[in-house]
Amino acid sequence: MALIVQKYGGSSVADAEKIKNVARRIVRTREEGNRVVVVVSAMGDTTDDLIRLAYQITEKLDTRELDVLLSTGEVVASTLLAMALHGMGHPAISLSGAQAGIRTDSAYSRARITNIEPRRVVAELDKGNIVIVAGFQGITEDMDITTLGRGGSDTTAVALAAALKASVCQRYTDVDGIYTTDPRLFAGARKLKDISYEEMLEMVTYGFKAIHPRAVELGELFGVPILVASSFNDNPGTLIKKEVSMEIRNKVRGIAHDLDVAKITVVGVPDHPGIAASIFVPLAEAGISVDTIVQNASIKNITDLTFTVAESQLAGAMSVVRPIAESIGARECVSDARLGKISIIGTGMQNAPGYAAKMFDTLSKANINIQLITTSEIRITCIIEEALVKDAVIALHRAFELETED
Ligand code: ASP
Ligand code: MG
């Protein structure tokens, strides 16, 4: 009997009818002869609603209390799902994260799983139960409830699958797989049969909000294949796994984009040791995460330093950088929030030349100016004007022939 971990997102359990629909799907998996562990998210927008409610009580939230509050969203969903299964005549039991043995550190609202002791889960499976685990939560050594950060139920599911040595982690939401690019932006996007962990990680890190990056990292680390599919239909999904077949290695697999990009340039910086640190250390201390960093070659010991941040962090970043720029004798500090990021991703790029050339050529033919460029071994990213991102996606999708089947 195979052990399957299924995870259902908030939109899949948003109301009573949808919970029953999920229960029917679980029953089907069970009746195919599998042992089933299910991880659920909170119903619909419950987590947002609870956060809003907490802020109506006080501006200064106590994170320990907040975590207990937020963890209830997933507990509610898991109990209702267990009841739906009982209603259909199937033995099932709901467990909180703590009961399922999910141990975390004590960083409230962004806790990390330290280990999983799935004894109770296994015991319940052995009794013939379908086990429903509340996602997004765990417990510290001191028995305090923690949450894993927004979107953390994906992480719970993959971690549990790893701990239980499940054959697959099936993650169901309202989207039916991973596409070559965001289908809402470009209708010509094609669903992928499979994608490697590495490629998926680059895709999600560079703006393709398909699954939580931590879940993909865990999947890769423990070799858990992750199926991304819809709970609303039976379309085949996309399998995130170790290796994609040899023939398609030599291809761009996906195009990610991100509109949430702002750029800061510190102009006319005296070029001597310690300057970069004097800017980036305080930014890190202020909790601002800096993405692309480019320092120009200096002329007469004067250089420009450019970096990008999320648009929501621009004001905060400018208030940190402005006084520093002044104190180190920079000429000025300018910013631009109307930027976007476009990335081509594929493991095949590693050993094959020409991808960068083709990307730049395609953008130039579409009259799109490239402001900054960064790369990894399997990704090339260009920062361009935000308004041109859609055109860039379409042009690149055509140029790299992503419409055609693998
Ligand atoms: N309910 C939590 C959130 O909305 C966790 C999750 O859905 O994965 O962030
Ligand atoms: Mg922008």
Image (cartoon, rainbow, N blue to C red):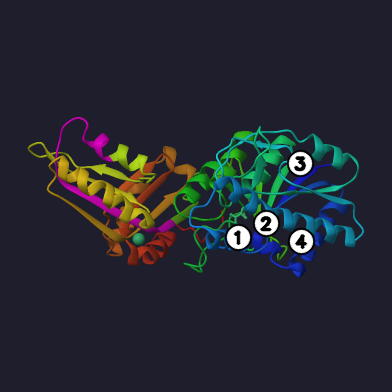
The residue range painted magenta reads 257-279
Distance of label 4 from label 1 (alpha carbons) = 24 Å
Q: In the picture, which quadrant includes the N terminus?
A: top right
Question: Which residue lies under the disc numbered 2?
Answer: 73
Distance of label 4 from label 3 (alpha carbons) = 22 Å
Q: Is residue 241 magenta?
A: no
Q: Position of residue 180 (x, y in %)?
A: 51, 57
Q: Is residue 273 magenta?
A: yes
State whether residue 188 appears in this view. Answer: yes
Question: Which residue lies under the disc numbered 1?
Answer: 50
Does the Cβ of the disc 2 residue fall within 8 Å of ligand 1?
yes
Question: Which residue lies under the disc numbered 4?
Answer: 22
Which of the two labelled residues, at mark 2 and mark 3, occupies the earlier sequence position? 2
Determine contact: label 4, label 3, CB under 8 Å: no
Secondary structure of the residue carrying tag 2 is helix
Amino acid type assigned to the residue bearing label 4 in the image: Val
Amino acid type assigned to the residue bearing label 3 in the image: Gln
Distance of label 2 from label 1 (alpha carbons) = 8 Å
Secondary structure of the residue carrying tag 1 is helix
Measuring 65% from the left and 45% from the top, which residue is drawn there?
137
Question: Which residue lies under the disc numbered 3?
Answer: 99
Depicted 299 relative to depicted 370: above or below: above
